[in-house]
């Protein structure tokens, strides 16, 4: 879990005392890789404070296609959207790797936010996160395939907590194509290109070797190279 100097997401928004209080009032949960955490449409009785691991948030469209909404990592809260919009899960959430979390009953979550005077900030946070997720989804769909793959990998690496290797992308090539709406053959071709250029390792798993080159593929207009 990130220390006080590495707080991010929901944890960075609220006072540390509030985060600690919520964790103490919740109960520990563990999820294995690929395990469903929330199912869209199910009743929402709690929110989760993610303390380690990365998760995938998505949903199926009316025509059956899967759409990636967001990625979340340690320090974020999951399920707070349902808390704000009426008590029903609005998306499917899966553990991308082994994850730990603290489940806080919705009533307790609301009470603590009010007691600590951060309820309005959290409401604005939820609204901003929903808006950003919508923009990110549109942007991702409009990008060239290689840039979409690179950007997803960069985002995934940036969410890794100290207990997980940021070089390792916890997705198979098949799953990568599914979440990005790309064919298996196209993903295989582009991954082969990145491996040939030394951006990814040649081992079977998707493992980043050159963060600087990957970032340039993801954000070419920035012209910068950032090492994780």
Image (cartoon, helix red, strand yellow):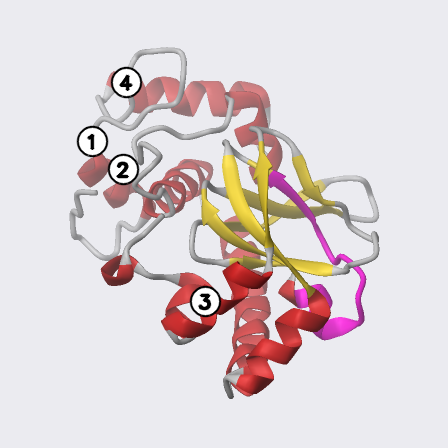
Q: Earlier in the sequence, mark 3 or mark 4?
A: 3
Q: CA distance from mark 2 to mark 4?
A: 12 Å
Question: Closer to the camera: disc 2 or disc 4?
Answer: 4
**Crowding near the residue tagged with mark 3, few <14, some 14–19, many ≥20 C-alpha atoms within 10 Å:** some
Determine whether, in the image, residue 221 is placed left or right of residue 161.
Answer: left
Secondary structure of the residue carrying numbered label 3: helix
Mark earlier in primary sequence (3, 1): 3
The residue pinned by badge 1 equals: 210
Query: Is residue 181 at least partly visible in the picture?
Result: no
List x then y, in percent, for residue 195.
30, 19
Q: Position of residue 118 (x, y in %)?
A: 51, 83
Disc 2 to disc 3, C-alpha distance: 34 Å
Q: Residue furthest top?
A: 203
Q: Camera-side residue: 71 or 7?
A: 7
At 76% from the left and 57% from the top, the residue drawn is 89
Q: Calculate the distance from the C-alpha at mark 4 to the C-alpha at mark 1.
A: 9 Å
Which residue position holds label 2? 214
């Amino acid at each position: 879990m990130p220390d006080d100097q590495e707080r991010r997401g929901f944890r960075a928004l609220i006072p540390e005392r509030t985060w600690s209080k919520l964790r103490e009032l919740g109960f520990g949960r563990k999820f294995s890789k690929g395990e469903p955490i929330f199912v869209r449409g199910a009743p929402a009785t709690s929110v989760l404070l993610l303390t380690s691991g990365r998760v995938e948030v998505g949903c199926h469209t009316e025509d059956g296609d899967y759409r990636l909404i967001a990625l979340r990592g340690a320090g974020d809260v999951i399920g707070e959207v349902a808390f704000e919009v009426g008590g029903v899960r609005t998306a499917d959430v899966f553990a991308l790797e082994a994850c730990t979390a603290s489940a806080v009953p919705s009533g307790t979550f609301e009470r603590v936010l009010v007691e600590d005077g951060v309820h309005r900030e959290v409401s604005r946070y939820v609204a901003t996160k929903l808006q950003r997720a919508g923009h990110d989804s549109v942007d991702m769909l409009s990008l060239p395939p290689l840039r979409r793959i690179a950007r997803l990998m960069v985002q995934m690496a940036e969410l890794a907590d100290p207990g997980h290797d940021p070089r390792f992308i916890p997705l198979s090539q098949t799953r990568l194509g599914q979440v990005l709406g790309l064919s298996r053959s196209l993903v295989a071709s582009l991954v082969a290109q990145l491996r040939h250029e030394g951006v990814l390792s040649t081992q079977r798993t998707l493992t980043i070797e050159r963060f600087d080159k990957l970032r340039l593929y993801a954000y070419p207009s920035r012209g910068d190279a950032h090492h994780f």
